[in-house]
Amino acid sequence: MKVYEKAPAKINLMLDVLRKREDGFHEVEMIMTMVDLADRLEMEELSRNTIVISSQAGYIPLDEKNLAFQAAKLIKERYKVDKGVYIHLDKKIPVAAGLAGGSSDAAAALRGLNRLWGLGIPLDELSRLGAELGSDVPFCVTGGTAIARGRGEQLEQIARPPQCWVILAKPPINVSTADVYGRFRLSQVEQHPSTEGMAAELAAGSFTGMCQQLGNVLESVTLKLHPEVEQLKESMRKLGADGVLMSGSGPTVFGLVSRESKVARIYNGLRGFCKEVYVVRMLT
């Protein structure tokens, strides 16, 4: 028996940091949604009790450093599964890009292995399990569009965004989320985005309102470290994107576009700036 799972990328429509917690993490408030750029996982039971991962991508770890491997190990140990699994990971989401590719792979592994081994674990329990692997994993388990609080594991499902085109562009640099949060200073944030404002615009189905409410306080760090991210944002605006924001800790920038007639011009213009450019849709 084989099980297949899709692992979509996420973008942050808004990201705010409220304070530094005593456990060393930051208290955040974010609105996240998923786009139709996805890795795909194929899972098959093995006769021997081991975890094997393969991928066509030569740039990702295939051992315990891989989040899908960690997810398989966690679910095996927690539910005492005395079976092995072979996981093939078809990688499409750029790594270290602020798109939660690794977290989505882990979430897909949890969902897929739950089905493969007939464990019957409820989705909310899978989500709590995912929180042990990373802050974005619980959201990636459930998907949809949600306000995420705490470290990102406290989720409240809300209205999905109006359908539009999403243009993703990743400059040829990698950004460490831990490094960005380590350098983040609340005092340097000039304006905080509004969770309530964004949620209200989504509930109203307003594309223009959604674009006006975009905001990410981590830009205060990443844009100073990597000026090319700021240049990429400016290029997107000049080419006609209706709303532009860095996703997560970066460096990927996304542009929201309502009219298809603009898409080709923006895509072609950005391809002169960086190689990794994707045109996708919201997963609504």
Image (spheres, rainbow, N blue to C red):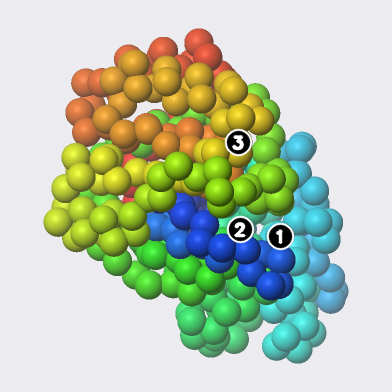
Image: 177 above or below 238: below
Secondary structure under tag 1 reads helix
Question: How many tags in the picture?
Answer: 3
Q: Position of residue 76 (x, y in %)?
A: 74, 80
Q: Residue 222 carries which label?
A: 3
In the image, what residue type sits under mark 1? Leu
Say which label, 2 or 1, has the lower sequence index.
1
Structural distance between the alpha carbons of marks 2 and 1? 7 Å
In the image, what residue type sits under mark 3? Thr
Secondary structure under tag 3 reads helix
Q: Nearer the viewer, residue 186 or 209?
A: 186
* Residue at 84 percent of width and 70 percent of height: 50
Q: Tell me whether the residue at label 2 lies in contact with that at label 1, contact meaning CB atoms closer than 8 angstroms.
A: yes
> Label 1 neighbourhood size at 10 Å, few (<14), some (14-19), many (20+)?
many
Is residue 11 found left or right of 276 in the rendered image? Answer: left
Task: Identify the residue position indicated by label 2 in the image.
Answer: 103
* Residue at 29 percent of width and 46 percent of height: 213
- The quadrant in which residue 267 appears is top left
Task: Identify the residue position indicated by label 1 in the image.
Answer: 67
Q: Which of 234 and 64 is in front in this view?
A: 234
Structural distance between the alpha carbons of marks 3 and 2? 21 Å
* Residue at 53 percent of width and 35 percent of height: 252
Q: Where is residue 219 in the image (x, y as percent from the top left)?
A: 52, 39
Q: Where is residue 14 in the image (x, y as percent from the top left)?
A: 40, 50
Say which label, 3 or 2, has the lower sequence index.
2
Q: Which of 99 and 57 is in front in this view?
A: 99
Q: Which of 25 and 275 is in front in this view?
A: 25
Secondary structure under tag 2 reads helix
Q: Which of marks 1 and 3 is in front?
A: 3
Q: Position of residue 215 (x, y in %)?
A: 40, 44
Q: Please say whether residue 135 is visible from this viewpoint.
A: no
Is residue 259 found left or right of 118 in the rendered image? Answer: left
